[in-house]
Image (tube, helix red, strand yellow):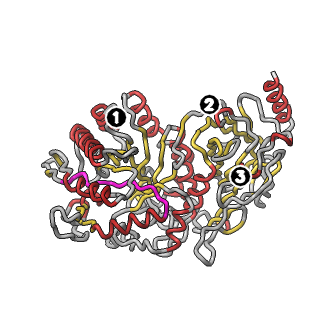
Amino acid sequence: MGGFLLHLMGFCLGAIMLLVGSATVAPSGSDVRGGAAVIVDGTNPIATTDEDFVCATLDWWPPEKCDYGTCAWGLSSLLNLNISNNILLNAIKEFSPLKIRLGGTLQDKVIYDTGMPQRNCPQFTKNTSELLGFSNGCLPMQRWDELNDFFKKAGAKIYFGLNALYGRTPMSDGSYGGPWDSSNAASLIRYTVNKGYTIHGWELGNELSGSGVGTRVDADQYAADVINLKFLVNTLYQGFETKPLVLAPGGFFDASWFTELVSKTKPSALDVLTHHIYNLGPGVDTHLIDKILDPNYLDGIANTFSNLQSIIKNGGTSAVAWVGEAGGAYNSGRHLVSDSFVFSFWYLDQLGLSAKYDTKTYCRQSLVGGNYGLLNRTTFAPNPDYYSALLWHRLMGKNVLSTNFTGTNSIRAYAHCAKGSEGITLLLINLSGNTTSQVSVSTNNKMYKTLKQHERPSTKKLNHLRGFGKKTMGFTREEYHLTPKDGNIQSQTMLLNNNILELDSSGNIPKLEPIEVEATQPITVAPYSIVFVHIPYFYAPACR
């Protein structure tokens, strides 16, 4: 009875409070609209992600990789990336941990020079007559040692993409046939185990599913090869308390192909189903921004997430879904779009939307490289999406909550249980360049948590997350308003609560400090802005 009265008192408080809000002043000349509301159902989670949901990729592309006359990769390959750079190290460390998927288009042309047997170790050479436009390449073990030392220092969790074409035969129809020859992969995995390197997952192949990119492999044969890889991992990691995950196929979603793969690897040969997303089209497309700002276009990818979720749910498999690679615009993205502020609209919407469909991890192409890197490929300074990813990682917990936004279709709204603290975190994305929305938040079960002084979450509990600063929480919430410099959505400079985000003189990532807002104020979502809102007093049983 006492608990019911406590919740009833919370409801009464909610009746006189709009619960959430912002002291942010609406830009002059913008259309200010009230009446917008987001309703969050905190009763039960609708999906769950991994705690370390955010992931990024490192690729194999050499400097000669060019698209539409632009060569956007430079020295960002696994073979030549400057892993002694302190800014790169600090950027990865901030996530503690960051999942990193090592792989990409050329991974199915990489030979591992473990010395067994002795072989030449050639580097990738551009050759348009070869599959994927390059000759075979090679990973020297000295470089593998260096990479593993770096990743250990950075605290990264590594998932490595294996060459799935090794030993196969090219067929007349453009596909590759025959079983996968696992000997070279086994040699690399054995070397890795003997060296004591920690790899959290081994992924078979890149973009060979369905019709494939460059070539393809039938699902029936791929399933047999996944079973082979699972046996290999179990054998080489015999005696280990925790074994690496087996991931596949790392390709574009094809319902029939994925269904067959699941059917022939169930119940447990495959741990993770990985698929790739480039739903904006080619980087050369001059309408990329129009697509990003169109809520109907953004919703289009939901069918992929929903169909994959259904295949897993009905397929009798223990596998879970990951987005193993997503750069939005294929062929290296587009400068001043996929490396600028406007891309955070697409990226954060992808994180929110995929999480609703039980995606456990989302790997962004790329950490460094192309025109879609989270970091600048020459200076390693963060691009805007880096800060968006870091805020998500720190604020959004693993339990996903049902969220319904009313008032305008230009606001995208997602809510999760708060990470490492009480209440929820709300993400609002304003795709409109003309309208400021005043947003209230409520819960569909009409109960709010009472905020009496003795019930207030402790400052220590709410603010232990590194880089967030110390705030007194009481009847307030924390807001993080992201905007582009000078209002230019193609700017590569992001502002947090009107402060430019930039490295300090020592190359350290800046602290991400919120503003504290009274609970009686509505959230002000400015035009072309993104707002994370941590609401510690929101009553959500799903978050206990």
Residue shown at 66% from the left, 36% from the top:
544
Which portion, as a residue range, is magenta?
Answer: 154-166
Indicate the position of residue 520 as horizontal and vertical percent values.
84, 45
Indicate the position of residue 68 as horizontal and vertical percent values.
37, 67
Residue shown at 40% from the left, 27% from the top:
314
Residue shown at 54% from the left, 53% from the top:
346
The reply to whether the C-beta atoms of the residues labelled 1 and 2 are less than 8 Å apart is: no
Q: Earlier in the sequence, mark 3 or mark 1?
A: 1
In the rendered structure, the answer to whether residue 176 lies left or right of residue 55 reads left
In the rendered structure, the answer to whether residue 481 lies left or right of residue 140 reads right
Q: Is residue 406 above or below residue 348?
A: above
Q: Earlier in the sequence, mark 3 or mark 2?
A: 2
CA neighbours of label 3 inside 10 A, class few (<14), some (14 to 19), many (20+): many
Of the pair 539 and 238, the residue shown nearer to us? 238
Q: Which mark is residue 44?
A: 2
CA neighbours of label 2 inside 10 A, class few (<14), some (14 to 19), many (20+): some
Of the pair 48 and 328, the residue shown nearer to us? 48
CA neighbours of label 1 inside 10 A, class few (<14), some (14 to 19), many (20+): some
Q: Confirm whether residue 526 shows in the render.
A: yes
Residue identified by numbered label 3: 435
Q: Amino acid at mark 1?
A: Ser
Q: Amino acid at mark 3?
A: Thr
Disc 3 versus disc 2: distance between alpha carbons?
33 Å
Please say whether residue 165 is one of the residues in the magenta stretch. Answer: yes
Residue identified by numbered label 1: 268
Please, which residue is most extreme toward the top here? 1
